[in-house]
Image (cartoon, rainbow, N blue to C red):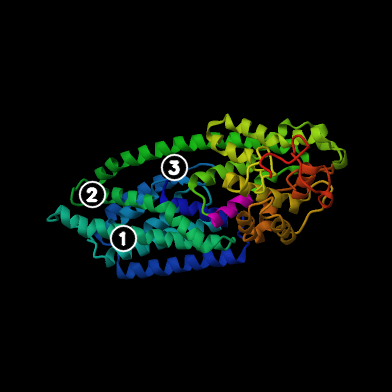
Amino acid sequence: MNAGRAAETDAERAASGRERNPRIAAYVGAAVTIAVLVAAASAVTHPLIADEIRPLLVLLVLGGLSAATLDYHNEGVGYSFTGFVLASSLPLTGPTGAALVGAVIPLFERSNRWTIAHLFNTALMVLMGVFSGMAYVWCRGLLPIPVHDTTPGQLLQHVGLPLLIADIVGMVVNALLLAGMVRLQGERFQDVLAGAIRQTAPLYLGYTVLAFLFVVLWRPGQLYELSAVLIMAPLLIARWAYTQYGEEFRAHSRILDTLISAGDGWDRGGTGHGKRVGHYTHLMVDELGLSFNERRDLRYASILHDIGGLGVPRAILEKPIELRDVGDRREIAAHPIMAAEIVGDIEFLADAARAIRHHHERPDGRGYPDGLRADEIPLVARLIAVADAFDALTSGAGSFPALEPDAAIQELRRRAGTQFDPQCVEALARVAGRVDEIVAGVPEQRGEGPWRDHDDPRVNDILLTGRPPEQSGALPDPVTGTGPPPGSP
């Protein structure tokens, strides 16, 4: 994956479909204006010279090939070697040539042409080229690189090191512009900035090494166009490997889409529920610092947590609340177990199965199916429980009216420490202001029958006791209907 492209695709997600947003339009307009001004200034202070035209043409061809063959997978991230091309342009063409490369490459892209996202991507590439090129010059990088009389030590000191620093500058420019764009969509600036740097730093390092080798082969090695042919081999191998990963990812996405459709279908009143829960948990993770694997498991478990409802007879869901008996509650309480069994047999979902099994556990030990307590419950499961309940409260479940987000947060806080993890409740509270955006993006289609969403904490009270919340006393085992559940005092 190309570092610059990773940032660009995130920017496209922020800008595409929101071109009427005046703040985004103003931000992109400012970026384009600054890009034009700094590129013009660079052309005056560091004009192209004759020796830079030949490598510039080759780099434009490589950049066009990279952009034209860009392959996306379903998360919107694609592989190209644009970052390598931009890095190589710094010692071979200077800041002005790098700006020209950055401006021309987006013209070869197959999508998003002449949209606000395309303009932003172009400005981003130009600014990265100019500022990286200026950093290379300020670090006393050789420009142009002498064909003769340069030792390996001199190349490392006056080409390799300045190129590394220049690429770090480009990475920071990339991250700052991206964070500014995404901030307009409500994300925290510092989180996006840190995430962009963390994600792209290893990629910039790799492309710096390849660019250094290419530059040395071009000038001191005097291989010129042949150096481009030689350096393309590892780039094409990397692209092939990433394409295979993309195919695997798309296969996983098709499986997920099938399971999501099946899961939504079991409760005709809950279409879109899993997707919204996934969106809520995605916002919450930045508040809690989950690892990469935990984030992956959270994504899968959030959207599939109710797939076990396929095994719950429709007749039970159609019953009025007051007519549900112990047997009905047993069927409902078994759905996390069935869900875990379904996804556990799929290799890439196996790690998410544990969170799915335990997303109805409670810190007080009165949850189901295993009566786990507090930290015995996986953090991913605790996050899903909170997001799950919040969506049910704000959507309306059966005979219970929907609550406003602030009221729903207060209901969750009232149950923090008993039914929900307090840390997870507060993580959701800090991002609850973006509820309208999420709900608008996932259509809701609720039926009129009773108890359409067992995830509502008020319905959970009834599931455990058979009585509405105001009538509930000691909570019995949800499976047998007698005595306290496993793990209760």
Query: Which of pointers 1 and 3 indicates the residue nearer the eye?
Result: 1
Location of the C terminus by quadrant is top right
Dot 3 amino acid type: Thr
Amino acid type at image mark 2: Trp
Q: Earlier in the sequence, mark 2 or mark 3?
A: 3
- Label 1 vs 3, first from the N-terminus: 3
> What's the distance in space between the residues labelled 1 and 3, CA to CA?
29 Å
Report the disc number at residue 69.
Answer: 3
C-alpha separation, residue under disc 2 versus residue under disc 1: 21 Å
Judging from the image, what secondary structure is the residue with disc 2 in?
helix
**Residue at the left extreme, as displayed:** 149
Q: Residues within 10 Å of mark 2 (few under 14, many from 20)?
A: many
Tell me whether the residue at label 1 lies in contact with that at label 3, contact meaning CB atoms closer than 8 angstroms.
Answer: no
- Magenta stretch, main secondary structure, is helix
Say whether residue 100 is left or right of residue 214: right
Question: Marks 1 and 2: in contact by CB < 8 Å?
Answer: no
Is residue 29 shown above or below 365?
below
Which circle marks residue 165 in the picture?
1
Q: Which residue is mark 2?
A: 218
Asked whether residue 379 appears in the rendered view, the answer is yes
Part of the protein shown in magenta: 278-288
> Is residue 134 shown left or right of residue 153?
right
